[in-house]
Image (spheres, rainbow, N blue to C red):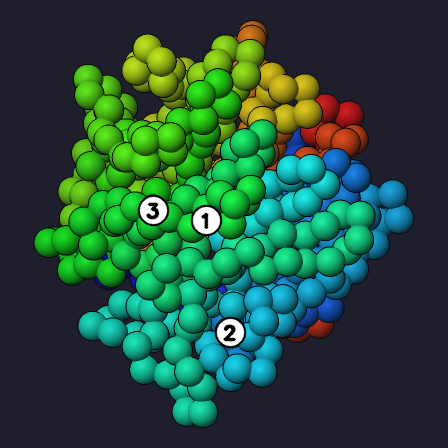
Amino acid sequence: MKSRIIFAILIATMVTGCSNVNNQEKQTLGEKQLTATSYFSGFDLAHDTYNAISAASNGKIYYVLSSQPYDVAGQVHVYDPQADTTRFLADLTEICGEKDKKVIAQGKSHVRFYESDGKLYFSTHVGYYEMIDGMERLPVTAPEGYGLYTGGHFLAYDLATGTFEDLGLAPHGEGVLTMTMDTERKQIYAITWPKGYFVHYDVNSGEMKELGLVSANGENGTIGEDYRVLCRSIFVDPRDGLVYYSIAEGDIMCYNPGEGIIEKLEDVDLRLDYFGSYDPTDAGSMGYNWRAVVWYPKEEVAYGVHGNSGYLFKFDPKERKIEIVDRITSEPSRKSGMYDQFSYGYLGFDLGNDGETLYYLTGGPIYENGKRVKGKDKIAMGAARGLENLHLVTYHIPTNTYTDHGPVFYEDGSRPTYVNSIALDKDGNVYTLARFEHEGKLVEDLVKIPNPFK
């Protein structure tokens, strides 16, 4: 199975991705449902987005809308919950200083925003790909009249002045796939795509370090040989500043910024029976990687979710211990006993405002005439996962309380699809980036889900 879906299949999926729900189908879902509001930000080329949305201390929601064309950049926008309005902030290629260079655009951001001392830090990624050996790859042949992609940029946005700053360029012309920040020490850590270099950027000094490849040849490798799906979520232990990420084989890696070395943790890994069995050289899932992970200060551990299986676990970096907590897929998924339909899992996973409740935007199977509508057994990079419902699940850690708040629909009865991001405002409303139809065209833009506890 190739690591990314071919364009024709993607278009077919897009056509069905926002289909309406008929009355009979709604009745089978029960009365417990959430109604979401979609916002068109004015960018009709907006395409599928991963992460790229966060709430800031000023109460506003910042997000990036992705673009696929080689000559159109992604866009940064902000939503003000008080005014209930969106506003365009910047073009990614322009703020990266590449507006007049005629190179492949900075098509997207693949990471969240991290706030430190009044600034939001984030990075850019490529949105235009070249088909090589049946896989979408980082272009090696530039479109006529254009140069190749220069690489992802690390950026900062000043909340007070509204100005952007270009901090530096990722090495080897690669995009930034995964990023986190030690906001206290002002250190940025990232994994690039497609090969997967580990990068350490010191905001204080401006120094950029490249620590080598994290896992074989990453997603630039040959399937069955040196291909490895790359980790999408990194976390920092705030106590000592050590950085942790996973690899497809299930090992947990630790980077010590003081010593400048990466080492594999011994006597602990993610090769758990509950997660399933995977070939780390194959594509179509995240393998043994965790899909998303967050730090939980009250227990001084990290909570994470494994993608395909949907199991919540906690990882204690000091004790070097992994413990299964619960399965936090949607209730219909739990009852079906099957893996989630999207075999990569979902990135819409974060700790809520109370510091105790995990929020998870996940998929749920659809039933027609009492039978489960089954997706593909194996997919490529999430582009043809099949139609499913979006569910909002919360998990209150101190009381071990799992709650599926039900499927999410737009007011017209259609479904939000291709959801892999999450943010919460100060009132507990949940935001994501999802597909919906606007004036006859399918876009991926801002979606607001009301506070499920009100």
Which mark, by number, is residue 177? none
Q: Position of residue 354 (x, y in %)?
A: 68, 19
Name the residue tied to disc 2.
105
Is residue 217 visible in the rendered structure shown here? yes
Q: Secondary structure at mark 1?
A: loop
Q: Residue furthest bottom?
A: 145
Q: Nearer the viewer, mark 2 or mark 1?
A: 1
- Mark 1 burial class by Cα count in 10 Å: few <14, some 14-19, many 20+: few
Question: Which residue sits furthest front?
Answer: 205
Residue at the location (30% across, 77% down)?
140
Distance Cα–Cα, label 3 vs label 2: 23 Å
Name which of mark 3 and mark 1 comes first in the sequence. Answer: 3
Left or right: 383, with 391 as reference point: left
Quarter of the image for residue 66 reads bottom right
Q: Which quarter of the rendered picture does the N terminus lie within?
A: bottom left
Mark 1, residue position = 207
Three-letter code, disc 1: Glu
Residue at (32% x, 36% y) in the render: 260
The residue labelled by disc 3 is 198
Instruction: Report x, y in % for residue 320.
Output: 30, 15
- Name the one closer to the observer, 27 or 44: 44
Percent x, y of residue 237: 45, 24
Cα gap from disc 2 to disc 1, whole angstroms: 25 Å
